[in-house]
Amino acid sequence: MKTRNINIKLGTKDLTSVDNILNQVKNLPSLSANELLHQLEIDKFNSKVVDAIFNLLTDEEEPRNKTYLDQNNKGDMSIGVGLDIQPHSHDDAKAVLLSVNPKWDFEGMQANENLPDVGLTPEEIKQVFYYTLKGATYEGIHFQGEIPALIRHLDNMSKKLGYETKLSDIPLKPHELVCLVSMAFNNPSLIGENFCKALHEYHETKDPTQLILQIMECSNKLYDDKKAIADSSGLQNRRTKELAIFLGDPENVHLSYRQFKRLERAYKTLGIELKPINGSPIYAQPYKEKERSSSTEETLKRIETMNDEYNASFVTYYGSKNGSEITVVEDDVHAVVICGDGNNIVNVKPNNYIESYPYLAGGIGHNQFNISSKAGNIMVWYAW
């Protein structure tokens, strides 16, 4: 059987790349998406946030200085950092290119590969990327821009979900914005309703748990199409890097066991064995009865099973400071148990979970986990 590698934790090259990107926006003030767009008008081609997004998106695929047929995007004619200039469907990209150099033959570039003859300079590539993000207008032709499109989408979702504060007005740390814009740039559908709910929860509670799950697990949809499955390990590595940038803590970000099993099952349909590298999936180990662990959550609540378009079902239990008893029942096959810093007791009932193990997340408390030996392997998740 053929094998395919997948990173459980980021490798040395990716860690260096993520660290460099984080350093680019270090010490910058928090910004909302609307404020970022306004800041781009001021900074022009000198925006550190734009440079960070550029470096993230071009980390694995070099920008192209001439037109090419993008096989990752329906074979559309493209240039730069994936700017789609396909005739008819993307004629508005003319505003982007001619804002940089009015002498370029846009229609010729739409029709032929390897144009312009001399190629775009590195500065022109970055300028094209700037207008791709910010938007551009040239002789009555308007290109909306990725960030204005994201703002419009966030505003529509805010209205749909009944939020008083628009998601586009939520202040985010610059590295969090880099992650958000990168995901929207790659595929706007990644910023779906459940992602927006998680973003709102993060703003209200400062608890990133649901947003972490949305970025790491729900944003890499597994299609039945064989090519999509074959490409999914690369996409997952990109999501891992984006999550590392969002959290600002690349050393401690890793692929979850559940997501690894989803990818593993998908690759088996292609006759490919998925091989984990840079760590083992989620640090699995067998536990004896009454094993102890701990965690950091302060409030007690339960989030019911979520079934979204990506089929990432889970149940999350949070312990409390005062101590509480939590029972993982037999049908909670995707349970995530995160205790508080009180003396919580977690009972894992006898069950053979097979591939759907509960997670027990550690931290600073002294919580007791009562685990039957029949419960199989328990996944310990030291995520933060």
Image (cartoon, rainbow, N blue to C red):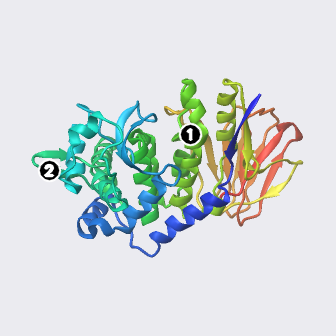
Residues at marks 2 and 1 touching, judged by CB atoms closer than 8 Å:
no
Between 6 and 322, the one nearer to me in the picture:
6
What separation in Å lies between label 2 and label 1 (alpha carbons)?
50 Å
Question: Where residue 272 sits: x, y (%)?
Answer: 71, 29
- Helix, strand, or loop for circle 1? loop
Q: Quadrant of residue 18?
A: bottom right
Image point (54%, 37%), residue name = 306
Q: Which residue is mark 1?
A: 304
The residue at the far bottom in this view is 27
Residue 270 — which label?
none
- Helix, strand, or loop for circle 2? strand
Q: Which residue is mark 2?
A: 138
What's under tag 1, amino acid-wise? Answer: Glu
What's under tag 2, amino acid-wise? Answer: Tyr
The quarter of the picture where the N terminus appears is top right
Eyeballing the image, is 271 above or below 329? above
